[in-house]
Every structure is written in structure tokens, then in C-alpha cells.
Image: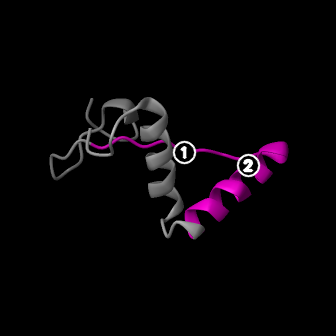
Amino acid sequence: MKCYWANPESYVHVALREVRRTDILWNENEVQLYENLKELAVKNQFPIPDYVKKVIAKHLGETKDG
């Protein structure tokens, strides 16, 4: 039940850290959205995954730390 491949929604890392993962594919007309996001991430000096987390946290009205 705690294996990443068997149950990624409830995965507990081997170091007993809770971990969740989301993979996003950008297809066809979504590619430009990705490129815009990438440009903003670079401009703000963030790796894309960190920038995506910041955007989502802001949208949800939360800080990165909860």
C-alpha cells in the first residue's frame, strides 16, 4: 500500500517522508502555455517544477509551506 508504483497517491518515501508526484504532459495547443510558463520560471530564476508549485499555491491562496 505504500509502494510508489502500486499506490502513488499515498506513497510514503523510503525515508518516511510523505511524497506526492504529478506528471503533466503538454500536448499540441498546450505547448505554448508550457513555453510561457517556462519563460516566466526562467525570468523569476526558478526551476519549472518549483515555479509551478508557487503558481498553484498562489492560486489556492496558500504559502509553499502550507
Q: Quadrant of the C terminus?
A: top left
Q: Is residue 9 above or below residue 34?
A: above
Instruction: Give the mark count.
Output: 2
What range of the chain is rendered magenta? Answer: 19-42
Compare residues 25 and 33 and report the one nearer the observer.
33
SS of the residue under disc 2 = helix
Q: Which residue is mark 2?
A: 33
Predominant SS of the magenta segment: helix
Residue at label 1?
23
Magenta stretch encompasses residue 64: no
Q: Residue at x 84, y 46 (%)?
A: 28
Could you tell whether 53 is left or right of 25 in the image? Answer: left
Residue 8 left/right relative to 36? left
Location of residue 40 with respect to 57 vertically, above or below: below
> Residue 59 at x, y = what percent?
49, 34
Residue 5, given in percent of the width and then of the height, sits at 40, 40
Kind of residue sitting beneath label 2? Leu
Say what secondary structure mark 1 lies in.
loop
The answer to which quarter of the image holds residue 29 is top right
Q: Nearer the viewer, mark 1 or mark 2?
A: 2
Where is residue 18? Give x, y as percent. 23, 41
Residue at 33 percent across and 45 percent down: it is 64
- Foreground pick, 48 / 2: 48
By what rule are the colours in the image chosen? one colour
Residue type highlighted by circle 1: Asp
For marks 1 and 2, give the CA distance: 16 Å
Q: Which callout, 1 or 2, points at the residue further toward the start of the chain?
A: 1
User: Does residue 45 sit above or below 27 in this rendering?
Assistant: below
Q: Residue at x 73, y 49 (%)?
A: 33
In the rendered structure, the answer to whether residue 66 lies left or right of residue 58 reads left
Check disc 1: other Cα within 10 Å, few if <14, some if 14-19, many if 20+: few
